[in-house]
Amino acid sequence: QVDLVESGGGLVQSGGSLRLSCVASDIFIVHAMAWYRQAPGKQRESVASINNVGTTTYADSVQGRFTISRDGDKKTLYLQMNDLKPEDTAVYYCHADGTVLGPPFNAIDAWGQGTLVTVSS
C-alpha cells in the first residue's frame, strides 16, 4: 500500500524553478497536507503547509519564492519553487493527515518516499 506518491524533483541551476507534485491514494480522506525537506546532515524541516480550507504557512526561508497548493479534490498537492538557491538542495517529502475510509476509520499520518531536488550554483 502506497499512500502518497511524489514526483517532480531534479537538477536545476540557481535561480531556476521546479514544481513538485504529490498524489494521495483513495484509501483515505485527506485533511491537512504539507511539504518537508531534509538536507544532507540536517534534520527534516517544514517547508510549507495547507489545510482543508486553503490556509497556508511557509518557512521564512522560502516565503515569497515557494507556493503550496492543492487540487479541487484536495488529494493532489503541489509545491511551485521559484528562484531556487543551492541551500534549497534536499530531499523533499510530502505529508498528509487523514482518515482511512471504512471502519474503524483510523487516523492516518502518511509520508511520501521523497524526491530529490538539487540546485547547482
Image (cartoon, helix red, strand yellow):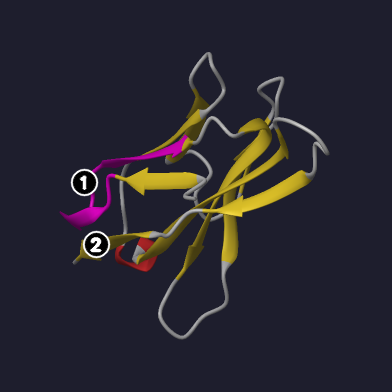
The single residue placed furthest to the front in the displayed view is 103
- In the image, is residue 10 part of the stretch drawn in magenta? yes
Residue 16 is tagged as 1
Q: Residue at x 71, y 47 (%)?
A: 108
Instruction: Please state which of residues 85 and 92 is positioned toward the viewer in this rendering.
Output: 92
The amino acid type found where label 2 is placed reads: Val
Q: Are dots 1 and 2 in contact, CB under 8 Å?
A: yes
Give how far across and how far down residue 85 sits, in percent: 32, 59
Ranked by sequence position, the earlier of labels 1 and 2 is: 1
The answer to whether residue 100 is above or below residue 86 is above
Q: Secondary structure at mark 2?
A: strand
Q: Residue at x 38, y 61 (%)?
A: 88
The answer to whether residue 121 is above or below residue 30 is below
Residue 119 is tagged as 2
Give how far across and how far down residue 31 sits, in percent: 70, 32
Specify the segment rendered in magenta: 8-23
The single residue placed furthest to the top in the displayed view is 72
